[in-house]
């Protein structure tokens, strides 16, 4: 796909080009939005709001970068703003610096597919889930996360460590349950 031409056509307000851009990125961006919300409906709302911003700010896109990364950044920012202003999420977006928990050195051999791991991440409290996604999946630094969320980088680090600790704990429980089910089946 020639993004340069597509962007030019979108800037001319051509509906077919806008639909093509939307159709190309929507499935991936819905997944991005879903990582930050607790329901598909909320993720769809975030994505729609995000695409409104994409088309509004498309003239600011610099063709030297990757269009998909630019769209993704808008979606992440839109998701964070949605979490901050939505009463349901805002109450869960409390960040307190806490002592770091030791992370297990054990590497449990667990066969989790991506969907199962995604569902475990979604079960984290919203604040932990948000920071885990920003750091581990989106690749932001703790300093960048701190700026985005209005917290210190130390708080971001401790929230990430706590999220990781919970995930490891849940994976280990999953592993022992899987082993029990395996042996019970024999």
Image (spheres, grey):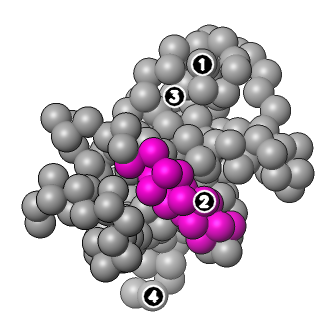
State whether residue 137 appears in this view.
no
* N-term mark: 1 or 3: 3
Question: Which residue is at the front of the view, 170 or 56?
Answer: 56
Tell me where residue 6 sits by quadrant: bottom left
Relative image position of residue 67 (x, y in whole percent): 26, 49
* N-term mark: 4 or 3: 3
Relative image position of residue 8 (x, y in whole percent): 23, 56
Q: Are marks 4 and 1 in contact (CB under 8 Å)?
A: no
For label 2, count other residues whose C-alpha is less than 10 Å away and answer few (under 14), some (14-19) or many (20+). some
Q: CA distance from mark 1 to mark 2?
A: 22 Å
Residue 130 is tagged as none
> In the image, is 147 to the left or to the right of 139?
right
* N-term mark: 1 or 2: 2
Q: Are marks 4 and 3 in contact (CB under 8 Å)?
A: no
Magenta part of the chain: 42-58
> In the image, is 151 to the left or to the right of 27?
right
Residue of label 1: 147
Question: Which numbered mark, 4 or 1, is in the foreground of this view?
Answer: 1
Q: Are marks 2 and 3 in contact (CB under 8 Å)?
A: no
Residue 49 is tagged as 2
Picture residue at 60% right of the left edge, 59% below the top: 49
> In the image, is 180 to the left or to the right of 45?
left
Residue of label 3: 103
Q: Looking at this rendering, what residue extends furthest in the left direction?
A: 2
Element on which disc 4 rests? helix
Question: Which residue is at the front of the view, 40 or 8?
Answer: 8
Relative image position of residue 4 (x, y in whole percent): 15, 53
Question: Which numbered mark, 4 or 3, is in the foreground of this view?
Answer: 3
Question: Which numbered mark, 2 or 4, is in the foreground of this view?
Answer: 2
Picture residue at 66% right of the left edge, 27% below the top: 149
Residue of label 4: 185
């Amino acid at each position: 796909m020639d993004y340069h031409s597509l962007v030019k056509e979108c800037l001319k307000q051509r509906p077919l080009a806008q639909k093509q851009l939307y159709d190309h990125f929507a499935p991936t961006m819905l997944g991005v939005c879903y990582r930050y919300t607790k329901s598909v409906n909320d993720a769809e709302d975030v994505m729609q709001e995000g695409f409104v911003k994409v088309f509004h700010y498309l003239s600011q896109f610099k063709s030297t970068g990757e269009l998909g990364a630019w769209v993704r950044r808008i979606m992440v920012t839109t998701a964070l703003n949605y979490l901050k202003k939505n009463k349901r999420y805002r109450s869960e977006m409390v960040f307190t610096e806490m002592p770091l928990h030791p992370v297990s050195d054990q590497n449990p051999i667990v066969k989790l597919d991506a969907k199962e791991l995604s569902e475990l991440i979604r079960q984290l409290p919203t604040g932990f889930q948000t920071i885990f996604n920003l750091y581990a999946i989106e690749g932001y630094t703790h300093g960048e996360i701190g700026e985005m969320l209005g917290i210190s980088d130390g708080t971001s680090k401790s929230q990430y460590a706590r999220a990781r600790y919970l995930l490891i704990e849940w994976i280990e429980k999953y592993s022992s349950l899987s082993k029990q089910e395996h042996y019970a089946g024999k």
